[in-house]
Image (spheres, coloured by chain):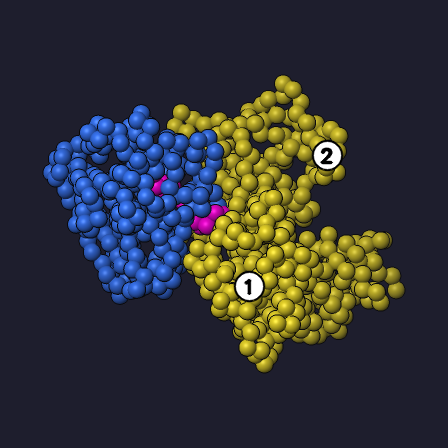
Chain colours: A blue, B yellow
């Protein structure tokens, strides 16, 4: 059992939980994920690690309540425990000195960006961070990420905070302003955002990494449910990823595969609401 | 007295009934039938059947106990060698193992050894298995990675010899393929749990959610333990590598079976994990896993369940019994059929498979006649779901984390006959070493490795 030590409501549907998991904290690295299960009937839910503290023996997850299981997770309180928690899974981010890098987090994708920002800064990079969301309520970890950023920007779709528009608009301006001298772009967030960012950087031939979030079951390389098409080759996000070259990802297929069980999800949510 | 030439039949759920439920298909022998079947054994002095048993059960010994009505003693004889009899008594391909060597086979059907092992294991379970007293602990510790048939067997054997054994399981439930792969109607999960409980009662600890290679590495385990056994199985599904394989509606057998068996998708929404299959399902491949997929589909409500296989029935790798059961349940076999592409709707949802008709040509390196396509024989079959069951490759997590470990070209861990890897103190067995094989061979490998580990630690 894995106890919830801290819970924060970041926005109405977005929650942070710090969980006691010393073995996972000991090994966790930026870019990796965990799989959790709430109870005996629960599905295996993959979530990227938003933070970890080796000394305290904790990991932090941040999640958007999008389906039945994440809604149920959001109802747990401090002192409650998760039945299962496995990790860290996936390959860590390749942290090294690239030079000038732009790290982009969109919506709930801001959460996994945080440990990457911290690690990339520590590796000696000039870190430019861009956080994007629909509106100001959905911008999270602003202080934490800005602390490790040499330049820090916010964009919101409605202009309620930072500049109005999409992260890609701001990225385009940055690329122009820096005369294309950017060594790496990394984008984590909604699939469509990662696609738009990758399309843009491809024009300028700037190396771009994205962190993919396909549907998974076991998360250990066994089921192939999380397969993604990378440059025409089938890869498993759980063991080969979750980070891939953004210019090679078949985003359309990923979006499609992420819709596989929407009907079931709706039914399950309805039942949960009825029960509540 | 002449011996009955055929096995006593084992009752089973009628096909028309069982396709609507997940309950076990064969129902097991009644005690009097078991005794009568055991009496068919000739008690050959040279015990040929034992040559066919990877876990070295004294087969004539336990059969004799049955003839005397001493089922407890029979259980004891089996348990002396086999830690998982209720499992092997259900899924072992005994027709290729012990029964293949039976003297009676020369003039009829062999003794139903598999059915009798199952009978005894079930008898023992209802009475409560007798656990041997814990031996004196020898102070040595062994870590076992993976709680599938290889790992559980190795762990049980070592515990019986006084080792302190911890099994690390990556998933949230024990059993590996016994839990996620083999369906409930072939191997009820309560039976897996009860066999795991037996292993635990021998003194073995099972730790879940431990993804070795990620949560902890094998070299780290070696700091804490005197030896490590790796039994992580064949995880990674193989693909057909044809266009459209990533469409919505195409699953690997592993994903489909894991959703249904381990995550209990057939109980959705009571269980949170869904599965969807539509009306027409096509399974590709003809091994036991393919039969499991095709039969599971019917139980989930598919109106039509096809097996598409590029060779003929004679070349099918599945057990005869599984093929028979699939046919009885209405699975339709489309043989000499090779898929060339999956076709999706505009939205990317699977709607058809295009295939070629094959004919058998010259024998290939496996000795089987190679299927060759008949030009111009393209046809299209409308399907809602495709299940790809054409085998698995070894799980990559441990090899990824251990660059020094010697691997074969398919990513399998190279071992000698007894399971020693290229690194002293590290042993491996089962599908991770051999590539995808059977439960009983994995159990045999776990047993041999336990012996090698014991030798290694005695000499150390």
Residue B337 colored in magenta in the image: no
Image coordinates of residue B35 in percent, x first then y, are 74, 67
Q: Quadrant of the C terminus of chain A?
A: bottom left
Q: Residues within 10 Å of mark 2 (few under 14, many from 20)?
A: few
User: Which label lies toward us, 1 or 2?
Assistant: 1
Q: Is residue A118 visible?
A: yes
Residue B348 lies left or right of residue B50; in this view the side is: left
Image coordinates of residue A101 in percent, x first then y, are 27, 39
Q: Is residue B440 visible?
A: no
Helix, strand or loop for the magenta stretch, by majority: loop
CA gap between label 1 and label 2 equals: 39 Å
Image coordinates of residue A255 in percent, x first then y, are 35, 34
Residue A160 or residue B17, whichever sits in front: A160
Image coordinates of residue B232 in percent, x first then y, are 54, 55
Residue under pointer 2: B364
Residue A271 lies left or right of residue B34; in this view the side is: left
Label 2 SS:
loop
Residue at point 61%, 47% (across, down): B408
Label 1 SS:
strand
Determine which quarter of the picture holds residue A21: bottom left
**Residue situated furthest top in the rendering:** B376
Residue at point 75%, 58% (across, down): B52
Give the magenta range.
A210-222
Residue at point 12%, 39% (across, down): A161
Q: Residues within 10 Å of mark 1 (few under 14, many from 20)?
A: many
Residue A212 colored in magenta in the image: yes
Residue A29 or residue B83, whichever sits in front: A29
The numbered mark, 1 or 2, whose residue comes first in the sequence reads 1
Residue at point 13%, 35% (across, down): A163
Chain letter of disc 1? B
Query: As displayed, is residue B80 above or below residue B187?
Result: below
* Residue B228: numbered disc: 1
């Amino acid at each position: 059992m894995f106890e919830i030590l801290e819970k924060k409501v970041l926005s109405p549907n977005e929650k942070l939980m710090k969980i006691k998991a010393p073995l996972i904290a000991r090994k966790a690295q930026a870019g990796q994920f965990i799989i959790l299960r709430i109870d005996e009937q629960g599905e295996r839910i993959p979530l990227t690690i938003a933070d970890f503290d080796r000394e305290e023996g904790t990991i932090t997850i941040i999640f958007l309540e999008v389906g039945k299981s994440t809604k149920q997770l959001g109802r747990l309180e401090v002192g409650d425990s998760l039945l299962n928690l496995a990790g860290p899974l996936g390959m860590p981010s390749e942290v090294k000195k690239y030079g000038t890098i732009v790290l982009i987090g969109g919506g709930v994708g801001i959460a996994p960006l945080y440990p990457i920002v911290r690690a990339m800064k520590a590796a000696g990079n000039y870190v430019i961070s861009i956080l994007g969301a629909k509106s100001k309520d959905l911008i999270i970890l602003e202080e934490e990420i800005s602390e490790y950023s040499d330049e820090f920007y916010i964009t919101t779709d409605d202009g309620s905070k930072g500049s109005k528009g999409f992260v890609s608009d701001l990225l385009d301006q940055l690329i122009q302003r820096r005369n294309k001298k950017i060594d790496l772009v990394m984008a984590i967030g909604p699939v469509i955002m990662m696609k738009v960012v990758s399309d843009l950087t491809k024009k300028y031939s700037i190396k771009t990494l994205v962190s993919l979030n396909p549907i998974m079951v076991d998360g250990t390389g066994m089921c192939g449910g999380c397969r993604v098409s990378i440059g025409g080759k089938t890869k498993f996000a759980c063991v080969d990823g979750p980070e891939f070259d953004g210019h090679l990802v078949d985003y359309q297929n990923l979006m499609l595969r992420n819709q596989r069980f929407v009907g079931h999800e709706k039914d399950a949510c309805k039942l949960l609401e009825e029960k509540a | 007295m002449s011996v009955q030439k055929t096995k006593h039949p084992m009752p089973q759920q009628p096909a028309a009934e069982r396709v609507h439920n997940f309950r076990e298909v064969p129902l097991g022998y009644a005690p009097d039938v078991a005794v009568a079947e055991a009496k068919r054994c000739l008690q050959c002095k040279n015990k040929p059947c034992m040559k066919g048993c990877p876990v070295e059960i004294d087969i004539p010994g336990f059969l004799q106990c049955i003839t005397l009505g001493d089922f407890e003693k029979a259980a004891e004889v089996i348990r002396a060698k086999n830690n998982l009899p209720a499992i092997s008594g259900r899924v072992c391909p005994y027709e290729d193992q012990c029964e293949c060597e039976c003297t009676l086979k020369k003039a009829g059907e062999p003794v139903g050894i598999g059915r009798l092992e199952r009978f005894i294991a079930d008898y023992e379970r209802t009475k409560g298995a007798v656990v041997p007293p814990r031996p004196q602990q020898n102070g040595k510790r062994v870590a076992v990675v993976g709680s599938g048939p290889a790992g559980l067997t190795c762990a049980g054997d070592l515990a019986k010899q006084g080792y302190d054994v911890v099994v690390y399981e990556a998933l949230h439930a024990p059993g590996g393929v016994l839990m996620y792969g083999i369906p409930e109607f072939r191997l009820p999960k309560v039976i897996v749990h009860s066999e795991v409980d037996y292993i635990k009662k021998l003194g073995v600890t099972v730790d879940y959610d431990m993804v070795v290679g990620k949560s902890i590495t094998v070299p780290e385990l070696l700091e804490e333990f005197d030896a490590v056994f790796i039994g992580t199985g064949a995880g990674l599904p193989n693909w057909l590598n044809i266009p459209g394989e990533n469409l919505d509606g195409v699953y690997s057998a592993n994903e489909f079976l894991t959703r249904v068996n381990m995550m209990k998708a057939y109980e959705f929404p009571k269980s949170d994990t869904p599965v969807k299959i539509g009306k027409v399902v096509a399974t590709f491949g003809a091994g036991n896993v393919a039969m499991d997929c095709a039969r599971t589909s019917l139980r989930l409500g598919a109106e039509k369940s096809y097996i598409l296989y590029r060779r003929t029935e004679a070349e099918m790798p599945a057990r005869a019994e599984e093929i028979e059961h699939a046919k009885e349940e209405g699975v339709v076999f489309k043989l000499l059929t090779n898929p060339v592409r999956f076709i999706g709707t505009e939205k990317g949802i699977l709607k058809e498979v295009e295939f070629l008709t094959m004919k058998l040509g010259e024998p290939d390196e496996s000795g089987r006649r190679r299927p060759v396509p008949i030009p111009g024989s393209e046809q299209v079959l409308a399907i809602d779901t495709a299940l790809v069951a054409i085998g698995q490759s070894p799980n990559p997590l441990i090899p990824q984390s251990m660059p020094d470990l010697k691997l074969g070209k398919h990513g399998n861990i190279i071992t000698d006959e007894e399971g020693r890897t290229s690194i002293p103190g590290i042993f491996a067995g089962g599908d991770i070493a051999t590539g995808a094989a059977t439960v009983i061979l994995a159990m045999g490998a776990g047993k041999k490795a336990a012996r090698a580990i014991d030798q290694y630690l005695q000499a150390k």
